[in-house]
Amino acid sequence: YAPAATFTISADTVLYAQWTVDTFTVTYDGNTSTGGSVPVDGSSPYVTGSTVTVAGNTGNLVKTGNTFNNWNTAANGSGTSYAPAATFTISADTVLYAQWTVDTFTVTYDGNTSTGGSVPVDGSSPYVTGSTVTVAGNTGSLVKTGNTFAGWNTAADGSGTAYAPAATFTISADTVLYAQWTPVTFTASSTRISTPGPSVPLYRSSPYATGSTVTVAGN
């Protein structure tokens, strides 16, 4: 009999309370994910008091510019946090929201065999992915004996992307900018200072990098 049902009595009657075991569900929410799929708990619903093992990111959830962190009972992360494979005792329907950490990237400068001065330090680093980075100048007066500073490059040997001071780029990974150096060169030549005569010798190795050894030509 349900409450408010009726029957016609013809004998002493005992009505026994009937009980249904409480069960609760566990569901997962991507929480602004931009791809992948949420896990599905094949053991849900659970009897009250059961132990729940929290799923990992089995559906390869992704969110642009972010990295999956863990799960939380509140979308904004203010609830109870659970890492994959953590357990809890269930006592109510539970939604676990994916938590995301915004990707950040660093910009560092490398003197790349400099012999003096100091590299710039980017006070805005680390940057949120997609941020615009303004490349520093040679603010620390880097020097390299026999060379002139010639900008920055993402590869020490200059084979990467070149950036002049004040250039900008959109960051999507940790970035090292290597100082680039142009050797200082000098010329050697011969000059006739008397009356006309045979041609003066030519220095075919000229110009010379600073510090090079020059062999003086004969007549």
Image: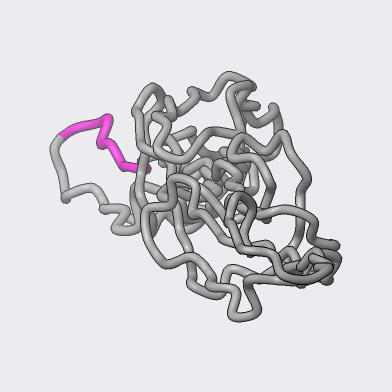
Q: Quadrant of the C terminus?
A: bottom left
Q: Please state the horizontal and vertical placement of residue 129, each as a whole percent of the image.
A: 46, 40
User: Is residue 77 depicted above or below 5 in this figure?
Assistant: above
Left or right relative to 60: residue 11: right
Observer-nearest residue: 45 or 132? Answer: 45
Q: Is residue 168 magenta?
A: no
Q: Please state the horizontal and vertical placement of residue 178, each as a whole percent of the image.
A: 53, 45
Observer-nearest residue: 67 or 150? Answer: 67
Q: Please state the horizontal and vertical placement of residue 60, each as a whole percent of the image.
A: 49, 70
Q: Would you say the magenta stretch is mainly helix, strand or loop? A: loop
What residue sits 76% from the left and 49% below the top? 81
Q: Quadrant of the N terminus?
A: bottom right
What residue sits 64% from the left and 71% below the top? 45
Question: Taking the image as drawn, is residue 156 in sight?
Answer: yes
Left or right relative to 9: residue 88: right
What residue sits 71% from the left and 32% below the top? 116
Observer-nearest residue: 203 or 183? Answer: 183
Left or right relative to 180: residue 116: right
Observer-nearest residue: 68 or 176? Answer: 68
Question: Taking the image as drawn, is residue 218 in sight?
Answer: no
Q: Please state the horizontal and vertical placement of residue 143, each as a whole percent of the image.
A: 61, 31
Q: Quadrant of residue 107?
A: top right
User: Is residue 167 depicted above or below 5 in this figure?
Assistant: above
What is the magenta range? 187-195
What residue sits 72% from the left and 34% below the top? 78
Q: How is the image coloured?
A: one colour
Q: Is residue 193 magenta?
A: yes
The extreme front residue here reads: 10
